[in-house]
Image (tube, helix red, strand yellow):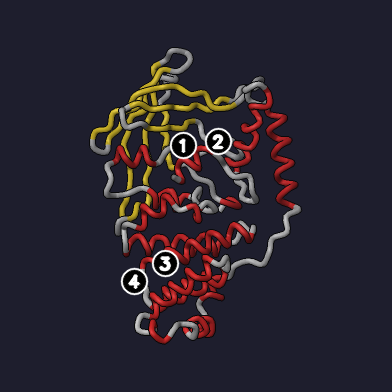
Amino acid sequence: SHSQYIAKTDRITFAHTKKVIVNFALSFKNMSGGKFMNKQIMFLSVFIMMAFISIANPQETYNSEDFSSEDICMKCKSNIPPAEKNNTAKALNALGMKEYRSGNLLEAARYFKCSTLEDDNFALSHYNFACMLSLLRGKDRDICNRDYVDDIKEHLIKSIQIDKNRRQRLSEDSDFENVCYFYFFRLLELNPENSLLDNLCLGSRWETSGVGLYPGDFVLSFSKNGEIKVSEFRMPENGPFGYVDFKGKFVLSGDNIIITYKNDKNVLVTFKGSIKYQINKNIFENFTIEVTTSGQSDIKQDYTFDLYSTEDCGA
């Protein structure tokens, strides 16, 4: 699944964010006997990666207007066999699949887009168009072009709202590896028809927001048996930095949640709060864990945990 894919690796491509940069630095820990690197090595890795980005030469980029012109759709429809003209949208989708299987992604995308214009309630063509844009985005390398992401989001949401079974296909489709780390995509994988527990486990990794190049203070990973892994980010003035993992328990009652674990100082830490979410037409518009923590100090702190995700170019 994409959740497993995200948990296993952050792709070091032209898609870089503050979290990807930190994970890039942390990935060298195996080269030092399993120990985390010091700050100097992390910042050196940041410099190398930013230099890599600066010499990139993006190819011609996608323009959403190119796929909506009447001339393109007229040309696409002219290739429909006479016997299939009674269902233009389905025929265009079939021609798009033929181009896709031949490796002609741009042409396939045009057919799928024209199919959606012919029948806006044809879920499959919306889904297939989003697939093509994800694949084209992976080849284009212009990761800062928001046209890709905005249109992928729009058409994926449309496909799931028309046919909720598209969500299951979405979670297994490798065509979306170029966008599966985006927040909107991670939300789409959650299912409003599932229990909150199922969605917490499906989310795989929940984290607080980081500051600058640094990741969030905490990461949560839920198990259906009531156990939880809590990871605390440590970055002392002198010494190694990284996440330290602790085992704990959680109790979910309705929308309310209590998380407890003992840290390395044998202090019992408690997170207490609730799950906040909004649903619109079988789609989660947001889904967060909002808690107050106690036990680490006399001061209680509020934290919001969100789905682990990255956004290219800080978008």
Badge 1 marks a residue whose secondary structure is: strand
Residue 215 is tagged as 2
Structural distance between the alpha carbons of marks 2 and 1: 9 Å
Q: Where in the figure is residue 115, as x and y percent of width and height? A: 43, 75
Q: Amino acid at mark 2?
A: Pro
Residue denoted by label 1: 207
Q: Does label 3 or label 1 sit earlier along the sequence?
A: 3
Q: Residue at x 42, y 27 (%)?
A: 229
Q: Does label 2 or label 1 sit earlier along the sequence?
A: 1
Structural distance between the alpha carbons of marks 3 and 4: 9 Å
Q: Residue at x 57, y 42 (%)?
A: 10
Residue denoted by label 4: 121
The quadrant holding residue 38 is top right
Q: Does label 3 or label 4 sit earlier along the sequence?
A: 4
Crowd class of label 3 (few under 14; some 14 to 19; many from 20; radius 10 Å): many
Quadrant housing the N terminus: top left
Residue 279 seen in this snapshot: yes
From the viewer's perspective, is residue 146 above or below residue 93?
A: above
Crowd class of label 2 (few under 14; some 14 to 19; many from 20; radius 10 Å): many
From the viewer's perspective, is residue 241 above or below residue 277?
A: above
Q: Amino acid at mark 4?
A: Asn
Residue denoted by label 3: 126
Q: Is residue 3 left or right of residue 34?
A: left
Q: Amino acid at mark 3?
A: His
Residue 280 seen in this snapshot: no
Q: Where in the figure is residue 180, as x and y percent of width and height? A: 49, 50
From the viewer's perspective, is residue 296 above or below residue 306?
A: above
Crowd class of label 1 (few under 14; some 14 to 19; many from 20; radius 10 Å): many
